[in-house]
Image (cartoon, rainbow, N blue to C red):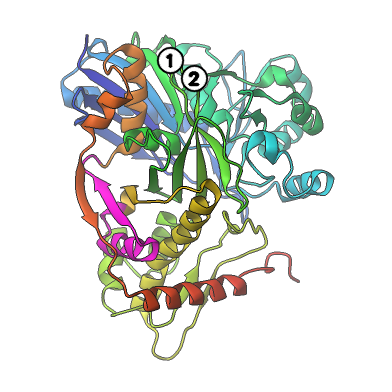
Amino acid sequence: MSQYVGAIDQGTTSSRFIVFDREARVVALAQREHRQICPHPGWVEHDADEILRNVHELAARALRDAGLQAHDLAAVGIANQRETTLLWERAAARPLGHALVWQDCRTDALVRDVVQRHGRQGWRERTGLPPANYFSACKLQWLLREHGAGDAAARGDVLFGTMDSWLAWNLTGGAHVTDVTNASRTNLFDIHRLAWDDDILRDLDIPAACLPRVTASSQRIAPIACGPLAGVPLCALLGDQQAAMIGQACFHPGQAKVTHGTGSFLLMHTGSRPVRSAAGLLSTVAYQFEGHTPCYALEGSIAVSGSLVRWLRDNLGLIAESSEVEALARSVPDNGDVYFVPAFSGLFAPHWRADARGVVIGLTHHSNRGHIARAALEATGYQLQEIAEAMQRDSDTPLHELKVDGGMSANELLMQFQADMLGVDVIVPECSETTALGAAYAAGLAAGVWRDSEEIARLWRAQRSWHPGMPEARRLHLQRRWRQAVQRCLDWADGT
């Protein structure tokens, strides 16, 4: 048995290929960014062909750097940005235009139509999700209409997929698949029956023939047929946030992780049955290993966190490099009563307000660049506290600690602020590549590299912990002021 597993980590801003050994150590890593195509305000697109080319090139580079050949890998797994929606021609494997990214909000009118006909909860009882731009359903509806592809999709000549499906189709030479975690993010999938929902498909005029076959998150799918990975079995598909749950060894109810990337995503394991949220959180499939019942999670998403730092860099020029934001934020002793609500495309859980837009409030003659930078970092901490509080209330399960990963986990000011706001220890793992590691673990389980989740849990190692230390009166004051700032950002997008 090979001691190495490969993972494709296809994210919102870049793709990676990482080789791990049996001790969950990174052997080689290759990464490349792809274009963010924004033809209109609120529209965000990706070139799926560009992403596919990058994946092939990154796999070749990582194998070369590791001194390995494809046959040295026991398996490959894919973790992907979720909800991003694509149509392609079956015969030519050619995309019908660009993919619509999860951040894209061009489907406002379609979402409003669903809400008008089915209420704000929509099909939430079956899918775990409210109607929102965030999910794939209305994006797919828009693409089918835009390209006039309804008849071709009904014949199965045009196919739908999220990015895992697109990569799997091309890598395997025609396996049209997705897994339960990605399917559960479309708003077309019954998370109780683990099947596409025929009533919703009819309502949105989406043909079932264009949808992928749904697999477990960890199972042998097909051998990779082309490129530098030819011959290696593809053995896992996972949405990136669910992959990070596996990478963080969150295998038991009450365990939770947050991943800080373009956005921030907090997931809490809730066991073998979905928990319905009274606070607007998402009920989603956490993962399913072949031969086992699925596990579920509650999720709260922050649309803008890491991308807010890039916005400070690229749009305002406050910093030259993203890594400079912490030093700038530490140049002031506190936020100076400045609050930054980054509702650039609305607010996600627990508010779900598409009409919200970003505000910076509390500016005075005393305010400077440092206060804005600090307010931008603290915004993530406030939003996480709102989500964590709602999760504990919905699940009736206390949160004892929070495992954190992603690029911003290196920001010590933010890590301490998170611990202070949530009132629990914040722990960063030794392996920072938890999303890719989760995909590798899932693939390795299917290939026999690791025996079970208990063996994986024993490999998890902490790098550093942050402990809450803020006085309670100060914490409550900051949270109260944050809530006031949130109220100021509402009802803006619909204004005149």
Residue 265 horizontal/vertical position (percent): 45, 48
> From the viewer's perspective, is residue 158 above or below residue 34?
above
Q: Count the labels in the image.
A: 2
Instruction: Identify the residue position indicated by label 1 in the image.
Output: 219
Residue at 64% x, 41% y: name it.
Answer: 129
Instruction: Identify the residue position indicated by label 2 in the image.
Output: 216
Residue at 50% x, 51% y: name it.
Answer: 391
Q: Is residue 383 magenta?
A: no
- The amino acid sitting under disc 1 is Gln
Residue at 56% x, 16% y: name it.
Answer: 176
Residue 164 horizontal/vertical position (percent): 49, 27
> From the viewer's perspective, is residue 250 above or below residue 355?
above
- The amino acid sitting under disc 2 is Ala
Q: Is residue 411 magenta?
A: yes
> From the viewer's perspective, is residue 241 above or below residue 61?
below
Secondary structure category for the residue under label 1: strand
Q: Extreme front residue here?
A: 396
Segment colored magenta: 409-431
